[in-house]
Amino acid sequence: MTTALYRRYRPESFGEMIGQSQVTEPLMTALRSDRVGHAYLFSGPRGCGKTTSARILARCLNCAQGPTDTPCGTCESCVELGRGGSGSLDVVEIDAASHNGVDDARDLRERAVFAPARDRFKIFILDEAHMVTPQGFNALLKLVEEPPDHVKFIFATTEPEKVIGTIRSRTHHYPFRLVPPAAMLEYVEQLCTQEGVEVEPGVLSLVIRAGGGSPRDTLSLLDQLIAGSDPSAGSGAMLVTYARAVALLGYTHGELLDEVVDAFAASDAAAAFAAVDRVVQTGQDPRRFVDDLLERLRDLIVVAATGQGAAAVLRGVSAEDLARMKGQADAFGPARLSRVADLVIATLDDMTGATSPRLQLELMVARVLARGTDASAPAAAPGTVAAAPVPVERTATALVGAR
Ligand SMILES: Nc1ncnc2c1ncn2[C@@H]1O[C@H](COP(=O)(O)OP(=O)(O)O)[C@@H](O)[C@H]1O
Ligand SMILES: [Mg+2]
Ligand SMILES: [Zn+2]
């Protein structure tokens, strides 16, 4: 049994955190200049480093060399509060999901009276703080407002608006954010190197997309892919293949997207419908496919607009893929690309309705093919195209409406 990646790589200092400089920089400055508050509120989406940062802050505050912006890592407190540590008597982590009532608050009040056992501060970390009841918060109010000098509070929550205003206004509030793809890509690339894992091109972009900006979710997915991978024939290192990743994460295989896009570009109805049929036959969710198609069209729009500069925007895309996308973008032309993207967006919006997703998908193909020919007509200025009658679309609307 190996420990999960996200636990093995849990940051132990603010310097190791990625994508949260809006929080880590001011906190480090406050620690350096000895302007630490007595209560903090860490809010933001799940898996972005709130609990981790609360522990790091506690480590910084109670380090024997501290308070410091970078814990020494070797004193008793630092070791106990490190990744493999046993936890410290003076840092109390309370899971507010299960300790949320008045009695728990009273209990906490009693514990706060006592001086720290060994270290500088007695630090209470209230995780999932939105679960504390209003009565529980009210019982804490006085203490949070004017705690003894040796007490610090750190509240962590995904829903800061559920923390009652009187408590919130007594804290320094730090909002955490989803981590942008570039920072995440750099992080997982480095992590794969450290782990001695090889990944095929395109795998990490998929993982990052699926992780939705949460480092924890991203690492969990990567972990699962690594666990399900075989050693590579060449080096013997674990190799995460594109085919496995795309299947596990439920995305459309790049080759299938190429087929559809090429068919659209060439206005080849037979090929387009055949490709879409394969989407359905392989059991893939049509909505997911349309979403993937939209993502690809967006990439093509970027390529059409920026040429070679696209590499900087579409991170993690190989030169080979870029060249193929350039070919596809040229085959469409920028005006037609954005019109097709509009149609795809409209389909995606409609797909929440009752009409069968498969039917919606096929109607979308019909619309794209019809618009394709329309748009290639000379002197089709933007605006006139939208106003021009499109027979297939009307048929489509009638069909959908009749169901
Ligand atoms: N900003 C980040 N930088 C690096 N790793 C992170 C970051 N945020 C989360 N992680 C990873 O995700 C795991 C869970 O983070 P955690 O602090 O528990 O998230 P939260 O409390 O916001 O839900 C950590 O152990 C770490 O591996
Ligand atoms: Mg947490
Ligand atoms: Zn230390």
Image (spheres, grey):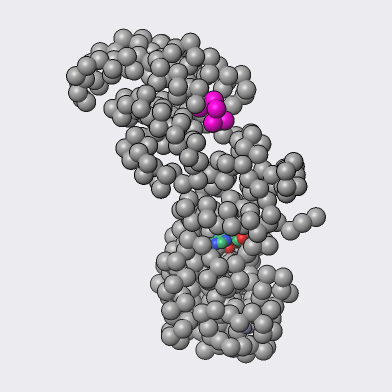
Residues in magenta, as a range: 253-257
In-front residue for pair 272/347: 272
- Image location of residue 7, percent across then percent down: 67, 61
* Residue 79 in view here: yes
Question: Measured from the top left, where is residue 256 in percent x and y?
Answer: 54, 25
> Main SS type for the magenta part?
helix
Q: On the rendered image, what quadrant is the N terminus found in?
A: bottom right
Q: Position of residue 102 (x, y in %)?
A: 59, 70
Residue sitting at 46 percent across and 31 percent down? 324
Q: Nearer the viewer, residue 374 or 400?
A: 374
Task: Decide if residue 219 is on the left or right side of residue 320.
Answer: right
x%, y% of residue 257? 50, 27
| Residue 73, magenta (yes or no) | no
Rendered residue at 28%/17% (across/down): 376
Left or right: 276, with 326 as reference point? right
**Residue 32, relative to residue 99: is it above or below?**
below
